[in-house]
Amino acid sequence: MLDVELVKKEIRPTAVRLRVLEQFQSDPAAVSLNELEERLQPVDRTTLFRTLKMFEKKGVVHAVHDENGIIKYALCADSCRCSYSDHLHVHFSCKRCKKTTCLHDVQIPEVMLPQGYVPQDANVVIKGVCNLCSGL
Amino acid sequence: MLDVELVKKEIRPTAVRLRVLEQFQSDPAAVSLNELEERLQPVDRTTLFRTLKMFEKKGVVHAVHDENGIIKYALCADSCRCSYSDHLHVHFSCKRCKKTTCLHDVQIPEVMLPQGYVPQDANVVIKGVCNLCSGL
DNA sequence: GCACAAATGCAATACGATTGCATCGTCGAT
DNA sequence: ATCGACGATGCAATCGTATTGCATTTGTGC
Ligand SMILES: [Mn+2]
Ligand SMILES: [Mn+2]
Ligand SMILES: [Zn+2]
Ligand SMILES: [Zn+2]
């Protein structure tokens, strides 16, 4: 059934790609290339790198720069069209457990930009302590 | 008079530091270490690196991760205390001219985080075309 | 099976961030 | 003014992530 997901987006469902997709679906936290490599060894990191780039282009995942500037990827929601006006959401980066989470339900608020600024995309990362770590 | 600025924040006003501060005051766009090195040559990049880190710690500048995850620094506003609840503002990264600008007047809107998430800091970068490049 | 294109793996490179260490300069204490 | 401590600077080396080049393997259509 994972195959279908990929084919739907014009991606040939190879073994590696299926494993990558599976990984994304099994864990909601955004993952870096390094983390992905660890979990899917012994698959080569280059292959994973290119898989991520392709997934991103095809709208399977989206990228976030975490608080250290490292790219992390997370599954797009079904409704996601990855455009600014459309669906962008806030991300949370926990200083304790280091996980970066998509807050799919928290839309990026409309910000009033000064005259002349044309927004197209956004990277919003709130840093702090996540729900699991805060115990609240 | 630049000296005073630094001394006020418990920073010894060395030649390099004064030049760095001067650079920040002369150009509002956020600068990366590389850009700073270019402009202040032949000052060593390590010295500049450490200067930036110190300036950041002392509250002279603040850091933003631009759309490529590269750290850029910009002068703090006088009123700035660099705390989340206090003053954080939105940044704009222009795809055309590549400049990252502090939108000091655009506060980061209060986002409703799900139960348990404790915000402490934020990195908000809107990508698009800036006022100078859009011609609007 | 054959021809061609896509996918994968491995090595090498690019580049920003950061550290180790030697040297230099400043400043207070003598 | 001299000495000594400590901070500041410079240079080289290293780390970590992102990215590319190229050879090889795999998949697909004919
Ligand atoms: Mn997300
Ligand atoms: Mn700013
Ligand atoms: Zn956490
Ligand atoms: Zn611009």
Image: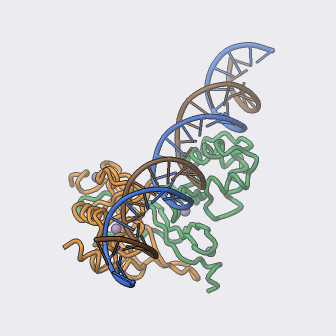
Chain colours: A green, B orange, C blue, D brown
Q: Nearer the viewer, residue B100 or A18?
A: B100
**Between A103 and B46, the one nearer to me in the picture:** B46
Measured as percent of width and height from the top left, residue B108 is found at 38, 74
Q: Residue at x 69, y 45 (%)?
A: A17
Q: How many tags in the picture?
A: 0
For the question of whether residue A70 can be seen, the reply is yes
Left or right: D20 as drawn, with respect to B88? right
* Residue at x 23% of width, y 77% of height: B4
Q: Position of residue A20 (x, y in %)?
A: 69, 51
- In this picture, is B126 found above or below C5? below
Q: Kindly identify the residue that appears in the image at 53 percent across and 76 percent down.
A: A128
Question: How far across and down, in percent of the image, does residue A94 sit?
Answer: 58, 72
Whether residue A80 sits left or right of residue A45 in the image: it is left
Where is residue A24, by image quadrant? bottom right
Residue sitting nearer the eye, A122 or D18 = D18
Residue A50 horizontal side relative to residue A18, left or right: left
Which residue appears at 65% of the width and 78% of the height?
A132
**Quadrant of the drawing holding the C terminus of chain A:** bottom right
Question: Does B129 sit above or below residue B102?
Answer: above
Is residue B103 at least partly visible in the picture? no
Outermost residue toward the bottom in this view: A136
Question: Residue A106: x and y, percent?
Answer: 50, 71
